Amino acid sequence: MALLKVNHVSKTFKSGNFWGKGRVIEAVKDLSLAINEGVCLGLVGESGCGKTTLGHIILGLEPPQTGQVLFRGKDFYKASSREKKELRKDLQAVFQDYNSALNPKYPVLTAINEPLRNYLRLSPGEEKKRIQELLEMVGLNSEDMYKYPFQFSGGQLQRINIARALALNPKLIVLDEAVSSLDVSVQAQILNLLAELKKELGLSYLFISHDIEAVYYLSDAIAVMYLGQIVESINDMSVFDQLAHPYSRKLLSSVLGIHPHMRKDLSAAFDELLIKPSKAEGCNYINRCDVKVQLCFEEEPALISVSEGHLAACHMIKR
């Protein structure tokens, strides 16, 4: 049984103006995914595609209009307050902004101790011992618990946030752009740390990122998201270079170093602007697609099997 299952989840927002007029934005549209124990699912897509909204839905921060979020077999949004508290113990998060995640008025000891006091009945000595273990686990010193956030670098602050996320021995951690604000060299260190912790503790991750190279490095499976929908997914990283959807191919060709033989594709048009077609029917990717045909304007493609464990939503693949 999957640790996390998201079934046909949708979330819309209304954007208004001074006169009360606006439009409905589909941040997440009829989306489904699953994460098994011990697996890192990389969710990749450009800014504005709905990745963070989906992360908030999974964490219980943003209720969906439709669909289910099943964690450990329980429907999170139908659970009682007591059940939700227990589920949250096994579901933690590390966010992009490592500064705002820590209160500058309090030492690291207080920040990491907060979840321990909310959930566990430990003596002061046991609390300090656990905090010391957590800091050493993420590559910091036990003496660091008495320091304040301003005394640390960005990479060290993110290590502290990871330590706090690990405090209750969670089963799943949502990593929402957790390395994107760091320098490249520090990103590599944090990715290595996350990989080591996953192996040692048997953790599962939902790794949300716009950086397909980072996703490739850390993930066991990948889902590509565009305008609120999963357009492609693979559960075997050995076929990573066989991503078939036109959008996935452009994401892949926008970076160097993963697969050098694909560098010939770098001339492909690529921009950061997510453009939703004016018509409701048809494929969402029409305005940016180089291989569209008439069917793409008339019918929205469904996810179909490309090979075992590989799904993609594109009429041209179907052909």
Image (tube, rainbow, N blue to C red):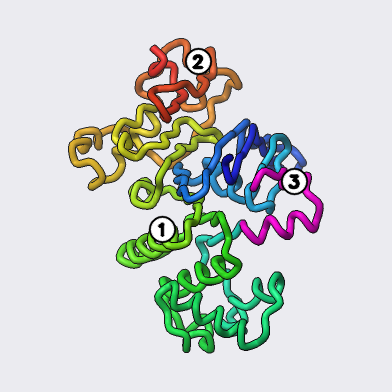
Mark nearer the viewer, 1 or 3: 1
Q: Secondary structure at mark 2?
A: helix
Report which quarter residue 194 is drawn in: bottom left
Mark nearer the viewer, 3 or 2: 3
Task: Mark 1 or mark 2: name the one nearer the start of the chain.
Answer: 1
Q: Quadrant of the N terminus?
A: top right
In the rendered image, residue 306, in percent from the top left (x then y), is placed at: 39, 22
Report which quarter residue 154 is drawn in: bottom left
Q: Is residue 279 above or below residue 163?
A: above
Q: Secondary structure at mark 1?
A: helix
Asked if residue 154 lies left or right of residue 188, the reply is right
10 Å crowding of disc 3: few (<14), some (14-19), many (20+): some
10 Å crowding of disc 1: few (<14), some (14-19), many (20+): few
Whether 72 is among the magenta residues is yes
What secondary structure is the stretch in magenta mostly built from?
helix
The three-letter code of the residue at mark 2 reads Phe
Q: Quadrant of the C terminus?
A: top left
Q: CA distance from mark 1 to mark 2?
A: 45 Å
Label number found at residue 297: 2
Q: Secondary structure at mark 3?
A: helix
Asked if residue 65 lies left or right of residue 177, the reply is right
Task: Mark 3 or mark 2: name the one nearer the start of the chain.
Answer: 3
In the rendered image, residue 97, in percent from the top left (x then y), is placed at: 52, 65
Asked if residue 19 lies left or right of residue 260, the reply is right
- Residue designated by label 3: 77
Nearest to the observer: residue 265 or residue 120? 120
- Residue designated by label 1: 199
Q: Are marks 1 and 3 in contact (CB under 8 Å)?
A: no
Mark nearer the viewer, 1 or 2: 1
In the rendered structure, which segment of residues is drawn in magenta? 71-90
In the rendered image, residue 217, in percent from the top left (x then y), is placed at: 34, 51
Q: Is residue 258 above or below residue 191?
A: above
